[in-house]
Amino acid sequence: MSEPLDRLGVLVSPALPDPTEFAVEAERLGYDSVWTNELWWESGVVRLTDIAARTDSIDLGTAILNVYSRSPAVLAMTAATLDRVSDGRFSLGVGTSTEKAVEDLHGMAWDDPNPVRRAHETVELTREFLTGSGRVEYDGESHHAADFPALGRDVPIYHAALGPANRRVVARLCDGWLPHNVPFPALAESFDYIAEHAEEAGRDPEAITVAPYVPSCVAEDADTARQHLREHVAYYVGNGEGYRRAVAKRFPDAADEVAEQWRDGNRPEAAAAVTDEMVAALGVAGTPDDAREQLRTVAEMDVVDRPLVVIPNGAEAHADRTLAALAPERP
């Protein structure tokens, strides 16, 4: 029987002092995979290329690249290239991001067509560009392609879907699911929906890897660690309607209070509105031994295949301690 933490990954934040060195240390500590995100500040692709050049065996992934700022052709070329230079270690993780990022950062229309349709077509066409036979032809609502050859590279594609329609994209098209801000007790039910639609599409649900974000902070003082989790949850619930809805499925009143306080500019009050029950259901926080047991509980869930440790926003000073305390091979 495998150790529950054998397939433990970690997200490498651009806010860390040296993200590449953090990834190198993760490999040394036995982590299964390292993933880069991308919103603003630095390119997740460029960072992951640097990590690929500095590591030997750890799997690499993006969690996530949004489906608006890069065309399917660029995503496919990026995935194929990273997979080649890393000797087959790369997985492509994509998602819709948020309306704020899409419209105010990238200057694109969030609902033309709707985000789920864009995600579906992006994944579908990216896959065709990677593994299709002959010349790729595609005509959708958001994307069109004609008369270009496929790249001949089979790269796993993950999708950070939250709502039911987006989870159907995972069911029909994807190799993996990256749930973010889905309370751990709700993961099994949320995946059951994916499994049902995967079977309807003639796919084996067991072939879909479930890799949830696990915001994690380890500190000598457990209250400090939990406060960082509260601030992290408040940021996401306050900034993204999809995140608020995901949390509100289990904590409706508290999620609404957090979002309202955040929108009103009351950031400390928003964090204070994140309850102890929300912290326990959405992350791992505490002293080294307690946090490790919390993470083990998540990793042992039947629905979870590949938990991804995420350092909360603002908790970078605790990143090295957290990485070491939760590592498959503790130093």
Image: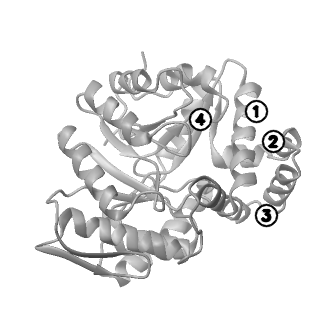
Of tags 2 and 3, which is closer to the observer?
2
77 to 126, vertically: above or below: above
Q: Position of residue 211 (x, y in %)?
A: 44, 51
Tell whether label 4 touches label 2 (CB within 8 Å).
Answer: no
Tell whether label 4 touches label 1 (CB within 8 Å).
Answer: no
Q: Earlier in the sequence, mark 2 or mark 1?
A: 1
The residue drawn where x is 38% and y is 82% is 140
Tell whether label 3 touches label 4 (CB within 8 Å).
Answer: no
Q: Residues within 10 Å of mark 2 (few under 14, many from 20)?
A: many
Q: Which residue is mark 2?
A: 271
Q: Which residue is mark 1?
A: 227
Q: Which residue is mark 4?
A: 216
Helix, strand or loop status at disc 3: helix
Q: Quadrant of residue 218?
A: top right
Q: Which residue is mark 3?
A: 252
177 to 25, vertically: above or below: below
Q: Quadrant of residue 172?
A: bottom left
Amino acid type of the residue that numbered disc 1 sits on in the rendered structure: Gln
Q: Earlier in the sequence, mark 4 or mark 3?
A: 4
Q: Earlier in the sequence, mark 2 or mark 3?
A: 3
* Depth order, front residue of 112/281: 112
Helix, strand or loop status at disc 4: strand
Q: Quadrant of residue 32?
A: top left
